[in-house]
Image (cartoon, rainbow, N blue to C red):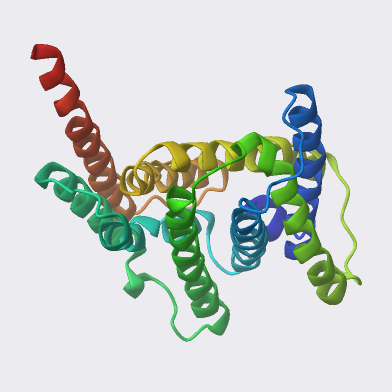
Amino acid sequence: MKIAMQDQLIAPFTFALARVLMSMLLMFLVAAIAGQLRFPSRHDWPLVLSIGLIQMGTFMALVNYALQFVPAGRSAILTYTTPIWVVPMAIVVFGEKVGRKKWFGFSLGVLGILVMFNPMSFDWSDPGVVKGNGILLGTAFLWAVLMIHIRGHEWQGTPLSLAPWQFLVASVVLLPLAYAFESDRQIIWSETTFWVLVYNGPLATAFCFWAMITVTRALPAINTSLGMLGVPVMGVVCAALVLDEPLSLENLAGLVLICGGLAALTLADAAPKIEDQEA
C-alpha cells in the first residue's frame, strides 16, 4: 500500500475501489463454487452494511489517504491501536473476563504501541503529518466498534456467504469518492502496479478481510484485538527491510514489548486447556 502511495502509482480512493472490486468478483466466484452464494437475510443486512461501509469502505479509503503522509511502519502501529478501544468496550458490552495474565499481556502490548508511536518523534508543525496520524487513530476506533458489532451479532449467514455483498456495499461507497476527487488522476501502469494490485486485491483484501471476520466471529473480542498486535510488528519489520525506513530504538523496544504481550496472551489462553487436560 505504501509503495502505491509514495510512488503515486494510483490515487488513494481509486486504489481502495480497485481492491474491493477485485475482491467482490473473487468472493462472488468462491461463494458460488462453495454453494454459499445467496442473498443476505434481513437479519444480516445491518452487519453487511456496517462491514461494507466501515471496514471495507471507509477504513481502506482513510488508511490509503493517510499513507500519503505517514510512514508505513508508523501507519501499521496506529491502525492497530484497536485493542486500546476494544478491551474496555468488550468488558462493558459483553462482560468478557480479563484475568491478570491477559491484563499483563494487554498492558505490555499497549505500552509497546505507545513506545513505537512516540508523539515527540514527528513534526507537529506539518498539517499533513498531524492529519495523517489523526486519521489512522480514528480508523482504529472505527474498527474496534465494528469488532464489537461482529462479535455481538447473531449470524444467520456465514462470513463467506456475506462477504461478496459486503464488498459490493464498499464499492458503492468508494465509487463516488474516487470519481469526485480523483477522476483527473490516471493510474500509472507498470509491473509494480500490477503486483501491488494482485497482492492487495485477492490476498490482502479478499482473503484477509474474510479471515479477520471469521476469527472475530469465533473468538472473544479481546483475544482477537490483542492477537492483531502482531500486524504492527510485521509492518515495522517489513517497512525497514523493503522501504528502508529506519528501525529506531523506540521501534525495537516496542517490538519487544508487543511480542511479550502476545506471548503472555498465548500463555493465558493455554493455561485453562492444560488444567482441563490434567483434570
Let me know if residue 74 appears in the view.
no
Rendered position, 61 above or below 256: below
What count of labels does the image hold?
Answer: 0
In this rendering, the answer to whether 178 lies above or below 10 is below
Which residue is at the front of the view, 158 or 263?
158
For the point 33% across and 52% down, which residue is it?
251
**Residue at image coords 22%, 40%:** 260
| Residue lying furthest top | 278
Which quadrant is home to the C terminus?
A: top left
- In the rendered image, residue 202, in percent from the top left (x then y), is placed at 72, 36
At horizontal 63% and vertical 54% (from top left) the residue drawn is: 2
Q: Is residue 8 left or right of residue 211?
A: right
Image x and y of residue 199, in percent:
70, 37
Q: Position of residue 96 (x, y in %)?
A: 25, 50
Foreground residue, 63 or 21?
Answer: 21
Q: Is residue 56 left or right of residue 242?
A: right
Seen in the picture, residue 145 relative to 124 is either above or below; the reply is above
Q: Quadrant of residue 163?
A: top right
Q: Nearer the viewer, residue 272 or 153?
A: 153
Residue at the (87%, 57%) spot, across then down: 187
Residue 273 pos. (x, y %): 19, 22
Residue 249 visible? The answer is yes
Judge from the rendering whether residue 240 lies leftward or rightward of residue 86; answer left or right: right
Residue 205 picture quarter: top right
